[in-house]
Amino acid sequence: MESVTSPANIELRKTPLNALHRRSGAKMVNFDGWDMPVEYPSSGGLIAEHKAVRNSVGVFDVSHMGDIRIRAGRKAGGALTAVQHLCMNDASRLQIGQAHYSAMLYPEGTFVDDVIVHRLADDDFLLVINAGTREKDINWVRENTKSFDCVVEELSDAYTQLAIQGPRAVDVLQKLTDANLSRIKNYWFTHGTVCGLKNILIARTGYTGEDGFEIYVPSDRATSEEVWAKVIEAGREFGIVPCGLGARNTLRLEAKMALYGHEISQKINVWEAGLDRYCKMEKSDFIGRAALERARAAGLTRMLVGLEMIDRGIARDEYRVCNEAGETVGVVTSGSPSPTLGKNIALAYVPPALAAVGTVVFVEIRTQKCKAQVVPTPFYKRPKKAAAPQTAKTV
Amino acid sequence: MAYPAQYRYTKEHEWIELKGDVATVGITDYAQHELGDVVFVELPKAGTKTLAGKSFGTVESVKAVSEIYSPVAGEVVEVNTALHDSPEKINTDPHGAAWLIRIRIANPAEIAGLMDAASYEAFIADKSKEASA
């Protein structure tokens, strides 16, 4: 067999927790130029990590994610105008303390990157961006906000970002903070003391399809390792495990959350990706809007759908989707066994004529045509809680 | 996990045990550990010809697909079809119950070119050093 782990490479970038991951025996891989844990044998491996997040709680080092702050310039209003110009969702609808999913688009209506926009203050925003697109994104933001009265700061290396995810995440984090987490709704955030550190950003966000929090702590190694250790200690009674990017990928795939370079890219537009509800055409103009109007009028040639394999076989990224005659009709963007469902699932682009639930298509796996069918997405939706969190508390 | 002394090993992390002119082939404990949770195997049918160094099947973890290479030339005489329903056995018993195929080998001398257990253990120790450097 071929080795699946890439050798250590001094060129790779490291998060402040890199040494800790290596000490704990994590399997490391090159992810978009970062030396990152893909799974922890000490946690029982990828499937155990995945199930811990679905059933209880897991913690991820996601410090490779980038952060861009856009705040007011000389006069108020410039930052909001800039964010509205850069991003497809309507940031004017955000209250202070609220966040939403959005994306920066090229003039063609395709993706520069998807982002989480946090409204820190009236005219002060934090954009959380992908690791592999950091440089491109910061250059894009600087280039396209030149004419606006705002200040752009890259804060990517200022934070160690931990994602505490799963139904018991709230119980774990509550032990470590004075903030009342029950008052933070999904996609809201606050600032509070965490592990004795003041003014820490605590957001009820994540990339797992599960309840959970992301916290942003100072990125020096000592602080980062101390917070990580305290989260593990606080989570012990709930069976917390460290989780790698392998479980992060299967969790987000089950929840049909897009991964840049797969479901979304410079070649795929918003309508194709099915992200319509995060794109507010009726707000003020933004980069990509005109192209999206034209694309909408022209109609779709491909759509993102969920597939479930009927035949034995695992669809993988970039495998061909074909019809019964063997003609290529589409492509798999992400494919994997689903640890929650016990089935082999995939996301794929297919023509609208083949996008209806129940449609049978074939995935070419090595030399074989394997039968699959279009299924509803997301593949997994978390059960609704009996008592939903109360009204939100803003900072 | 110990590497049985009566087996021979390849640089691609397969093991082979020869009895008479029939060899049993599997992947090593190191290989299953590198792969992680094995969720799928694809094996040839009995009667398939194998060539030394050529792929005869695949083992898949959640994350990755790995080709398995035949250590020797021959003909497949038996396939461990039980692995289709319980591929995770490859993680728990890679050197025993989770053997993959049996081959009637063309040239028993081919085995001599493979590593013995001590050489293989030295080989993987080097690899681990590389990975944690």
Image (spheres, rainbow, N blue to C red):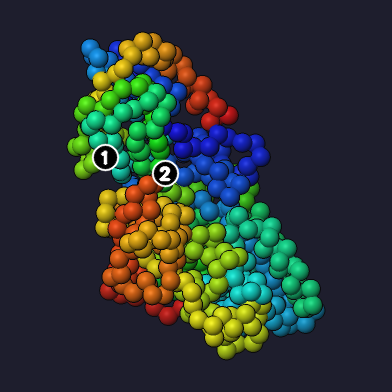
Label count reads: 2
Residue A383 vs residue B50, the one in the foreground = B50
Kindly identify which residue carries mark 1: B87
Residue B48 in the image, given as x and y percentages of width and height: 28, 31
Residue A161 in the image, given as x and y percentages of width and height: 55, 56
Q: CA distance from mark 2 to mark 1?
A: 14 Å
Residue A54 in the image, given as x and y percentages of width and height: 33, 58
Local crowd size for mark 2, using a 10 Å CA cut-off: few (<14), some (14–19), many (≥20): some
- Residue sitting farthest toward the bottom: A282
Q: Amino acid at mark 2?
A: Ala
Look at the picture and state if A10 lies above or below B50.
below
Residue at x-position 50% and y-position 34%: A23
- Mark 1 — on which chain does it sit? B
Q: Is residue B55 visible?
A: yes
Drawn side of residue A57 relative to residue A81, left or right: left
Look at the picture and state if A39 lies above or below B4.
below
Residue at x-position 42% and y-position 17%: B120
- Mark 2 — on which chain does it sit? B
Drawn side of residue A24 relative to residue A280, left or right: left
- Residue sitting farthest toward the front: A325
Secondary structure under the numbered disc 2 in the rendered image: loop
Determine which of the numbered discs, if any, sits on residue B64 in the image: 2
Locate the C terminus of chain A by quadrant: bottom right
Q: Is residue A216 visible?
A: no
Residue A321 in the image, given as x and y percentages of width and height: 40, 60
Drawn side of residue A68 relative to residue B41, left or right: right
Both marks 2 and 1 on one chain: yes
Secondary structure under the numbered disc 1 in the rendered image: loop
Q: Amino acid at mark 1?
A: Pro
Locate the N terminus of chain A by quadrant: top left
